[in-house]
Image (tube, grey):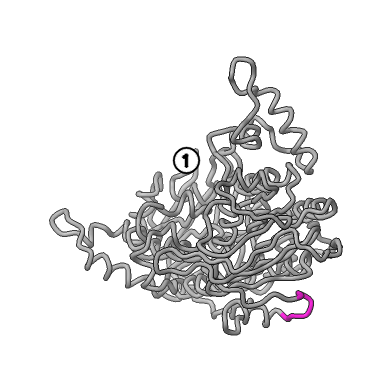
């Protein structure tokens, strides 16, 4: 992607920025610059300080030390609106949209247009929102729709458009493709933005995106800048080594299949309900069964149906050969089936509790005596499962809201393990986490299966399904359109079926032509 030649004077200049949270140093002496029309990548493991830096630039938190300049003038925003007034806009990874308000109202928050009576001018702002969406290549979202009724991928696009439409001078994109199935849409919007001179700080864990978009990247580690260099001059291994302080291989060694004979851990037969149309499959003990599908093909409905969050009209579910009625998450838990949900911030964690309390919730009865919670028992229970997800003990007494996204996800997975579940339903569990955290999650999945547990694993990253799964189901239009066995797992074949091609016969090769 072509970029405007960087002039001598930076649009954004940070000098010796520091931020502490008590004894924890989030940022230490961070300096960087950004030029007009430049896309600069920002990399680092979870906990490296990326989120704190984004929040500092966005006006969410104030730095303790250092100086920030925008256009050569002092910049110290107190709120997101203050940052916006200085030409700095952010599309957050953890979406800032209000789910109970419409698309149009969200687009113009905090001051949507009002009429003569002081009421929101609904029709007017919906027309304006429709024009904004269309100008950004979006014609499939009704402005009057409640944001909470939209899929995560659609909300991600709205978050990005809301940051872009005012044509900011500086744009911060925090893991913008984490929930997008169509990255090309974003890349086109980025090209338009830099064409008018916008400067972009692009935070991502996906190196192919950094290499495609960015001439230069900055790497943070333990709150400090450890590298600021040309992307083309570095190998992937050099980038990973700078991020982690050690060599990290992005691919993961495939473990031998742990599939066990006997009654399936989970069997679904002819399931029908909202977003689920005659779905059936079996999941063996010790198996990692992948689920793939483009955005909005029913995968979320399927996972929620299996724990009673999306009521079924018909069909049956068996656990270890016994018919069960999984009409609620509690009923599913009693049967040994646990869902790790898509959105950890809104569905996975209790922000006001400590990390230990978040993990121990399902087992709080085991840690109580005479109706009183015993902290020692709670700690012992929690520390039995945290090694499986590589969650350091120092995070347990901290409020979970203060943890990085990767460590929060580890806590959510640890909570699933503490239930003693026999079957884990993992919905995109590595979304928005760094390479190191992904490795920990992959190991947990493989160890759980090796111990006889069963895993139903949906991922938006097809390479994860290829490297981790024993086989893969592909959903299309609320149905299972095909099943790919282990020996034929490939991104090309999965994508072909997910794009609407009929699944080939078992002895056929991958289709010669693929629709992406």
Residue 155 higher or lower than 405, as above or below? above
Residue 136 visible (yes or no): yes
**In the figure, 291 relative to 270: above or below?**
below
Q: Quadrant of the N terminus?
A: bottom right
For this orientation, the residue located farthest to the front is 73
Task: Estimate the x, y position of residue 77 in percent, counting from the top left.
Answer: 59, 50
| Residue 458: percent from left, percent from top | 57, 59
Q: Nearer the viewer, residue 76 or 3?
A: 76
Q: Any magenta on residue 231? A: yes
Q: Is residue 239 left or right of residue 221?
A: right
Q: Is residue 296 visible?
A: no
Magenta residue check for 100: no
At 32% across and 72% down in the image, what residue appears? 383
The answer to which image quadrant residue 276 occupies is top right
Q: Nearer the viewer, residue 435 or 319?
A: 435
Span of residues in magenta: 230-235
- Looking at the image, the residue that sits furthest to the top is 117
253 or 61, nearer to the observer: 61
**Residue at image x 60%, y 58%?**
54
Determine the image quadrant of residue 391. Answer: bottom left
Residue labelled with disc 1: 311
């Amino acid at each position: 992607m072509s970029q405007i030649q960087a002039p001598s004077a930076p649009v954004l200049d940070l000098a010796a920025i520091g931020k502490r949270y008590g004894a924890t140093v989030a940022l230490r002496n961070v300096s960087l610059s950004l030029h007009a029309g430049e896309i600069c990548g920002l990399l680092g493991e979870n906990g490296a300080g990326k989120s704190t830096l984004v929040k500092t630039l966005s006006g969410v938190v104030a730095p303790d030390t250092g100086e920030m300049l925008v256009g050569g003038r002092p910049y110290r925003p107190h709120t997101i609106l203050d940052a916006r007034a200085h030409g700095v806009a952010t599309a957050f990874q953890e979406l800032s949209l209000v789910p109970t308000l419409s698309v149009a109202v969200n687009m113009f928050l905090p001051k949507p247009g009002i009429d003569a009576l002081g009421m929101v001018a609904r029709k007017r702002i919906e027309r304006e929102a429709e024009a904004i969406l269309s100008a950004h290549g979006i014609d499939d979202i009704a402005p009057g729709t409640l944001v909470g009724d939209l899929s995560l991928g659609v909300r991600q696009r709205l978050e990005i458009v809301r940051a872009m439409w005012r044509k900011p001078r500086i744009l911060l994109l925090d893991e913008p493709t984490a929930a997008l199935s169509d990255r090309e849409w974003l890349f086109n919007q980025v090209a338009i933005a830099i064409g008018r001179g916008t400067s972009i700080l692009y935070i991502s864990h996906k190196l192919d995106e950094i290499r495609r978009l960015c001439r230069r990247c900055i790497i943070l580690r333990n709150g400090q800048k450890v590298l600021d260099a040309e992307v083309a001059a570095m190998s992937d291994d050099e980038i990973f080594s700078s991020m982690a302080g050690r060599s990290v291989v992005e691919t993961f060694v495939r473990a031998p299949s742990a599939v066990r004979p006997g009654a399936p851990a989970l069997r679904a037969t002819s399931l029908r309900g909202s977003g689920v149309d005659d779905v059936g499959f079996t999941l063996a003990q010790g198996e990692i069964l992948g689920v793939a599908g483009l955005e909005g093909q029913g995968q979320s409905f399927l996972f929620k149906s299996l724990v009673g969050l999306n009521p079924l009209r018909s069909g049956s579910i068996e656990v270890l050969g016994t018919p069960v009625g999984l009409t609620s998450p509690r009923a599913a838990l009693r049967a040994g089936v646990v869902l790790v949900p898509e959105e950890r911030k809104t569905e996975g964690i209790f922000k006001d509790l400590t990390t230990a309390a978040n993990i121990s919730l399902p087992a709080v009865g085991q840690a109580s005596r005479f109706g009183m919670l015993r902290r020692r028992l709670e700690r012992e229970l929690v520390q039995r499962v945290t090694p499986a997800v590589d969650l350091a003990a120092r995070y347990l007494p901290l409020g979970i809201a203060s943890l990085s996204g990767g460590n929060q996800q580890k806590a959510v997975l640890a909570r699933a393990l503490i239930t003693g579940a026999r079957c884990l339903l993992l919905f995109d569990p590595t979304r928005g986490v760094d390479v190191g955290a992904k490795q920990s999650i992959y190991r947990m999945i493989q160890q759980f299966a090796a111990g006889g547990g069963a895993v139903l694993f949906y991922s938006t990253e097809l390479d994860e399904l290829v490297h981790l799964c024993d086989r893969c189901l592909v959903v299309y239009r609320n149905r299972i359109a095909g099943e790919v066995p282990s020996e034929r797992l490939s991104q090309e074949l999965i994508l072909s079926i997910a794009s609407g091609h009929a699944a080939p016969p078992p002895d056929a090769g991958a289709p010669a032509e693929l629709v992406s």
